[in-house]
Every structure is written in C-alpha cells, then in structure tokens.
Image (cartoon, helix red, strand yellow):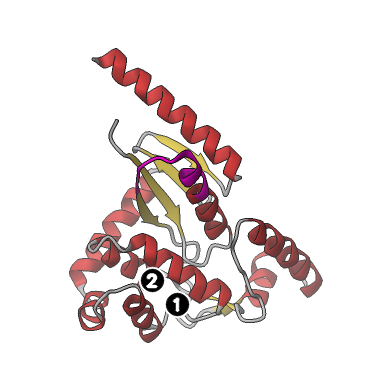
C-alpha cells in the first residue's frame, strides 16, 4: 500500500491546531505507518490587521467575554495543551496576528520538504515564545532555523507567483466546506474534524487503512 496522504487544514494562530497536530503525529508514530503529511492554509481572521489585536480585546469584541471568562477558558486550554505536549504561554502570547505571510512561508517550505519542521518551529515561536509571526524578520529567522536560505526566502515572501500559488490552495480549501479547524483529509477522500485524542486518531486511521487495503484487494 502506498503511503497514506494526510493534509492538515490549519491556521498558525489556532489554539487547537497544535494540539490536534501533536495528537495525530503521536498516533502515526504508535501505528508505525508511513505518511505523506501536508498542510492546507485556513485563515481564521483574514481581515486581521498585520500588527494584530490583543487576545483579550478580540474575545471581548467577538464574544463579549470579560477577563474572568477569558482566564477560565485559557486555563482550561492550557491543561488540554499540556496533555498533548504543547506549551501555550499566555504571559507571552498576548496577540492574534494576520497569518497570510506565515502561510506563504509554509507553502514555500513545502518546496524543500520542510513544512513539518517549519510548522513545529512556528508553534514554539508563537504559542510558547509569543513572537509576532506576521513580522517578516521574525519569519525569516524561523526559516533559517529550519534550514531555509534567508535571502531566497525573503524574495519568495514578496513573490507574486508564490502568492498566486497560495491563493489556489486557499480556494481549494474553501471548496471543501470546512467550518472549523483543525481538520485532517485522508487521501483526499475522508475527513477527520477537530483536535481529537491520540486514541481516536489511532482507531480512525487504523480503520481507514484496513478498509483501503480491502478495497485494493477487491479491485485486483
């Protein structure tokens, strides 16, 4: 059987995306399966100013939450994240940012098979260190950290062609009618929604692989 293709629909600032990412990666490791893992961009707030907005202001504006409600949510989120091996430091992670440029960097990294490394470094930079992942210099430092060339990456981030390629990915994502993230697409045919548990991912992936093998045998 060929490698299983998994495409993760995500946004860089989505709190639940690194949790889902870590859990599905753990499931893949536990099952000892070969996977071709890719990323599909999803912008939670495409109109967000590049400089961003404080998380506290965002939740108050969007949902009418006061500081107590937000703190309760953040404490619960941090506990869930820790159980998945993810660090979210709200003393440093104070803002939401526009993620278009970060998604463009993720697309560029795919050309060098660096998407997974870059995603993990972006998670650490934003959720743990609170870095501004809309800032070009910050993104270039992250790119260099995962082995990408700084000069060519800076050129790519301002490239109209790369922007068009990213837009095609975004258009494809919109045809999938995905309403929440993270989401995981298996071989372009099956969908798993949400940051599920490791056990859930293991069971779902195992079932999908078994059914795929049966279908292949029938086809032969």
Range drawn in magenta: 26-36
Q: Quadrant of the C terminus?
A: top left
Callout 2–callout 1 Cβ contact below 8 Å? yes
Q: Which residue is mark 1?
A: 133
Name which quarter of the figure residue 84 lies in: bottom right
Depth check, front residue: 82 or 104: 82
Q: Identify the residue shown where x is 30% and y is 55%.
A: 169
Q: Where does residue 166 sit, x and y in percent of width and height?
A: 28, 61
Answer whether residue 1 is visible to the viewer in this image. Answer: yes
How far apart in space, not on screen, are marks 2 and 1 (Cα)?
6 Å
Q: Where does residue 93 sit, x and y in percent of width and height?
A: 60, 77
Which numbered circle lies on residue 1?
A: none
Q: Quadrant of the N terminus?
A: top left
Q: Where does residue 124 sit, x and y in percent of width and height?
A: 51, 72
Above-or-below relation of 38 to 57: above
Q: Identify the residue shown where x is 26% and y is 82%.
A: 150
The kind of secondary structure element at disc 1 is loop
Depth check, front residue: 87 or 195: 87
Answer whether residue 46 is visible to the viewer in this image. Answer: no
Q: Which residue is mark 2?
A: 102
The residue sitting at the bottom extreme is 137
Above-or-below relation of 212 to 173: above
Q: Where does residue 83 sit, x and y in percent of width and height?
A: 66, 56
Name which quarter of the figure residue 176 lies in: top left
Q: Is residue 163 left or right of residue 52?
A: left
């Amino acid at each position: 059987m060929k490698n299983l293709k998994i495409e993760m629909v995500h946004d860089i600032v989505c709190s639940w995306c690194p949790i889902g990412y870590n859990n599905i990666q753990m499931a893949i490791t536990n099952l000892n399966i070969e996977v071709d893992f890719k990323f599909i961009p999803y912008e939670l707030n495409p109109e967000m100013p590049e400089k961003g907005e404080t998380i506290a202001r965002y939740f108050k504006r969007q949902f009418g939450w006061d500081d107590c409600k937000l703190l309760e949510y953040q404490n619960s989120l941090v506990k869930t994240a820790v159980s998945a091996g993810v660090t979210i430091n709200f003393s440093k992670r104070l803002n939401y940012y526009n993620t278009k440029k970060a998604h463009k960097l993720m697309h560029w990294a795919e050309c060098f098979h660096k998407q997974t490394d870059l995603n993990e470094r972006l998670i650490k930079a934003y959720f743990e260190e609170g870095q501004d992942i809309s800032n070009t210099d910050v993104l270039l430092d992250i790119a260099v950290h995962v082995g990408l060339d700084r000069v060519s990456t800076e050129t790519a981030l301002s490239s109209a062609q790369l922007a068009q390629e990213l837009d095609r990915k975004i258009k494809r994502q919109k045809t999938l009618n995905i309403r929440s993230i993270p989401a995981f697409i298996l071989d372009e045919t099956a969908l798993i929604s949400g940051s599920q548990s490791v056990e859930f991912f293991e069971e779902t992936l195992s079932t999908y692989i078994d059914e795929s093998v049966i279908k292949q045998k029938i086809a032969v």
